[in-house]
Image (cartoon, grey):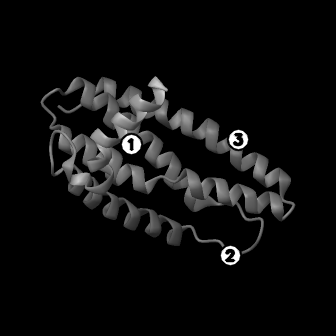
Amino acid sequence: MGILLDFTTFLVKNIGILINPFHLRGNKNMVFIVGVGGIIGAILRYSVGLLFANSHPGAFPLGTFAANLIGSFLLAWLTATAARSPKLPKWIVTGVGTGIIGSFTTFSTFSVETVKLIQGHFFFMAFIYILLSLLGGWAFSFLGYQSGRRRGLQ
């Protein structure tokens, strides 16, 4: 009973966040900044999708693959750079990291494209897509992090 009461108290105290996200603690403009970044990232993601568009079944989903690798590198670079540059404003890190890069990369599209490949009986292509996405994402994150640690913001 105590756990339920604690959970109910938590919900009542924090329900304002669910109803009004601008009621967040800290910078009240952060939601707006992330939203603007999200718009930018979504437009960039859509553009990459158009650039690498493929329409035949079983084709390697190059647009999503490219967006996720680029995003892995950039987010890791930003994370390492922010750690080395304490004067870098939090709103920039959050706006770029969560807003732009967060909406540019897409795990959901990766998942749906993988399911479509499997449903179309393109098992080997699905396996290669999963393998390259995971290994490539880790490699690009590693490279981005190392680059950000070495250089940071000069």
Say left or right for 5 vs 58.
Answer: left
Q: Position of residue 76 (x, y in %)?
A: 40, 35
Q: Secondary structure at mark 3?
A: helix
Extreme-right residue of the structure:
121
Give amino acid for label 3: Leu
Q: Residues within 10 Å of mark 3 (few under 14, many from 20)?
A: few
Q: CA distance from mark 3 to mark 2?
A: 22 Å
Q: Position of residue 26 (x, y in %)?
A: 16, 39
Q: Position of residue 81 (x, y in %)?
A: 27, 31
**On the image, numbered disc 3 is attached to which residue?**
131
Give amino acid for label 2: Ser
From the viewer's side, name the closer residue of 86 and 146. 86
| 3 or 1: tag closer to the N-terminus | 1
From the viewer's side, name the closer residue of 60 and 7. 7
**On the image, numbered disc 2 is attached to which residue?**
55
Q: Is residue 85 above or below residue 122?
A: above
Q: Residues within 10 Å of mark 2 (few under 14, many from 20)?
A: few
**On the image, numbered disc 1 is attached to which residue?**
74
Give amino acid for label 1: Leu
